[in-house]
Image (cartoon, rainbow, N blue to C red):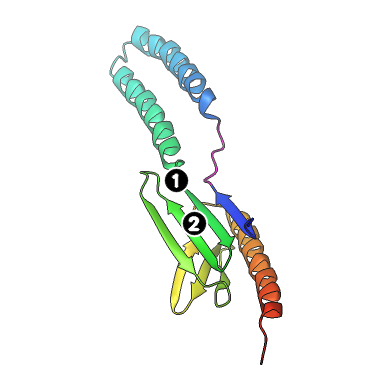
Amino acid sequence: MSPALDLILTPNRSFDRAHVPWLVGAVGLIFFVGGLRFLVLGAWPILPFMAADLALLGWAFRASYAGGRGHERVLLLGDALTLHRVSARGVEKSFGFEPLWTRVQVEETPLGDAHVFLAARGRRVRVGQFLSAPERREVGATIAAALTAYRGLSSSTSSIA
């Protein structure tokens, strides 16, 4: 049986991981040339701060890509809607929903942001928190369309005797 919905949501990374060493190296080269100038001018105390800036830049990229290992998977298969969430540290958590009773709630904020929730029987779970607002709206619409299609198919299989 193929799933009616199988979404894998991953955080966006705007800079390719393979190019990070090149960027840090280029910034390091610029800092080195600038540092030589400061050294000649007698402003040597600036050099440790430049080195700290370069180390922090490398650390920031490393932390960003470590955070990007987390992901979510929304799966509508059979009679179950499941949200599998894997954190950046590898901690897995699953949330199960009954598709007939689950609603997709897209909450708009005054600043133009959007938050998507799966809600059923007094429980709400946020979906795609790491996505941009337009992407969250699109994910919410996709899940809602899949649930609507599921409800259309499941109502034709019920019978009244």
**Residue 29 sits above or below residue 132 on the image:** above
Per the model, the C-alpha gap separating discs 2 and 1 is 11 Å
Q: Write down the region rendered in magenta.
A: 10-15
Helix, strand or loop under label 2? loop
Pointer 1 residue? 70
Q: Residue at x 48, y 63 (%)?
A: 126
User: Which mark, by number, is residue 129?
Assistant: 2
Magenta stretch prevailing secondary structure: loop
Q: Is residue 62 visible?
A: yes
Could you classify mark 2 by the number of other residues whose Cα lies within 10 Å: few (under 14), some (14-19), or many (20 or more)?
some
**Residue 117 sits above or below residue 138 on the image:** below
The percent position of residue 152, horizontal first and vertical second, equals: 70, 75
**Residue 74 sits above or below residue 21 on the image:** below
The quarter of the picture where residue 157 lies is bottom right
Question: Of the residues under marks 2 and 1, which one precedes in the sequence?
Answer: 1
Point out the frontmost of discs 2 and 1: 1
Could you classify mark 1 by the number of other residues whose Cα lies within 10 Å: few (under 14), some (14-19), or many (20 or more)?
some
Q: Residue furthest front?
A: 161
The percent position of residue 22, horizontal first and vertical second, equals: 51, 19
Magenta stretch contains residue 13: yes
